[in-house]
Every structure is written in C-alpha cells, then in structure tokens.
Amino acid sequence: MTDFENKVEDCLLQIRKKTDFVPKIALILGSGLGALAEEINCVETVSYHEIEGFPFSTVAGHKGRFVFGYIGKIPVVIMQGRVHYYEGYDMSDVVLPIRLMRKMGAELLFLTNAAGGINPKLKPGDFMMITDQISSFVPSPLIGPNVEDWGVRFPSMDTIYDKELCRVLQDTAKECDIPLKEGVYVQTTGPNYESPAEVKMLGMLGADAVGMSTTVEAIAGRHMGMRICGISCISNMAGGTAENPLTHEEVSAIADQAAPLFKKLVKTAIANMAE
C-alpha cells in the first residue's frame, strides 16, 4: 500500500470508531451554503479536527465537519466546509475527503460551490448546473502512484458530470420552479480573485463560471467510480466585470440570500436521484 492509501485507510478507521453509518450520497457544501447540513435528520457529526492526519478548513464560514444523516430516507454524508489547494495542502490531501467518503460507501458525489460569473448571461444569485469543467490551471489529483483498487491509471473524463443526474437536476428545478442555468466551471488556485485579463482569457477558453474548488474533487470521485453532479451558486461577477472589488464577505452574503432556494433544490434533487 502507498503512504497515501494507508492515510485514507487510517482516517476511515478513525471514522468507523465514531460511527458505522453507510452513506449513499456524498454532498459537499460550498461557501455560504453550509446551512443545509443543519436541516437534515442528523445521526452523527465528526469534526475534521477529530481525525488525526485529516486536513481541516481554515476559511471563515466553513465549519469543517462531516455530518451523517438522512435527507428524507436517503443516507447522506455532508461535508460542511471543504479544504482548498490554496490553504497550503498537497493536492492528495485536498481530495482525501472524496477518497474517504467513497470508502465509507458513497456512490454519488454532489458538489456545490460559490462561483464568480464569467458568462454575462449569469448574474449574482443564479444557480448554474455544471455540465463540464476545466481543471488545467491546478495540478491533477491523480499525479503520483496509482492505487489500482481505487481506479485505472488513465480514467476517462468525457462524461465527468453524469448525464442522467444532470437530467434529474433539470427536472427537479422545473418541479420546484427554480431557474437553473447551465455551464462550464473552471478552477483556479486562488486565494486571489482573478484579474480582468484572466477572466477574459477564461471566457475565451469556454468557462462560464470560476472558483477555487470542485474540479479536482470531481476528478478524484470519477477516478473511484462515483457518479458526479454539481451546482454553482453565482455569488458575484468575476473580476473586471463588476463595479466594485470582490470580497469574501460579498460571496458569502449572496450565497446566504440564495440559501432557501438552494436547500429546496438540493434536498428535492437528492430525493429524486434516489428513486
């Protein structure tokens, strides 16, 4: 076993000493979207600090814990706050939570984030279903020795966002009467926001929204055979497309305003995905 494989197994063992809960769906809640975890039928919570060797969130507003419980009758594990590459972690540690949730039993990975809008058709407060991604600006989480038990050395990413799950998201949005845009998400390293020239470049490359997470998580989940879907909450227009300089407080405030509709959309979608 590789050192990292041993690390994942050790984290799993520590989790199992606290709960034997087996989730079907893993849900990651982005900036300003963590309130959903407070509304599920909770069975157990485990702080990242309780797991020796596990990376922990340093971003304001990220509680940094796993929440185990049920949305309806569906067993879920929720990451209430994620870890980011810009926090100084190795990329393998950034995706360690994905590896761990898959080992817990999760088969479906539902990613959410707060993102900056690049496409002028998007506006703050919009929800954008992620149909594809650009991860070329951050290191691949698959660099290094491949663990064959996790996945193949060269996994395909041609349908990284599951088409059937995307259809369920679209149908759910219509059912809930919630507008849902679609687009391509690009991840940059952060923690600085993008310059106007960078935003222009990213738009020319085909990106509709930009953020500092998500794509590497999707790659790691796909590598391990998980089905992936994702939603961005457009919290601001990306650098150079808005009148005032961007702030983290602005990002969180818009996400907070969108939270009621977001929670309705996600909870209903999860129930529909399980059918």
Image: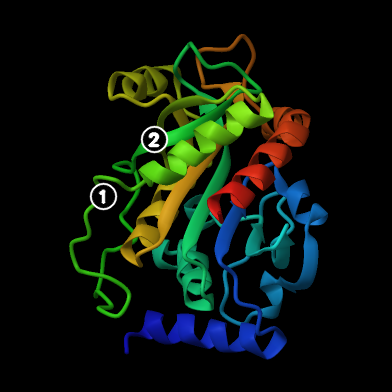
> Which dot marks residue 157?
1
Q: Kindly identify which residue carries mark 2.
A: 131
Residue 23, given in percent of the width and then of the height, sits at 59, 70
Q: What is the three-letter code of the residue carrying label 1?
A: Met
Residue 2 x, y percent position in the rendering: 32, 85
Please report the residue visible at 47 percent of the width from the left and 65 percent of the height from the top: 107
Figure check: 167 above or below 229: above
In the foreground, 119 or 177 = 177
Quarter location, residue 176? top right
Tag 1 near tag 2, CB within 8 Å: no
Counting residues from the start of the chain, the first of labels 1 and 2 encountered is 2
Q: Quadrant of the C terminus?
A: bottom right
Between 148 and 42, the one lying in front of the other is 42
Give the residue displayed 35% in from the left and 20% down from the top. 203
Give the SS element for disc 1.
loop
Total residue callouts:
2
Left or right relative to 155: residue 39: right
Tell me if mark 2 has few (under 14), some (14-19) or many (20+) residues whose alpha carbon lies within 10 angstroms of its own: some
Residue 249 in view here: no
Left or right, residue 119 beside residue 67: left
Q: Residue furthest front?
A: 275
Residue found at the far left of this picture = 154
Q: How is this picture coloured?
A: rainbow
Q: What SS does tag 2 mark?
A: strand
Q: Amino acid at mark 2?
A: Thr
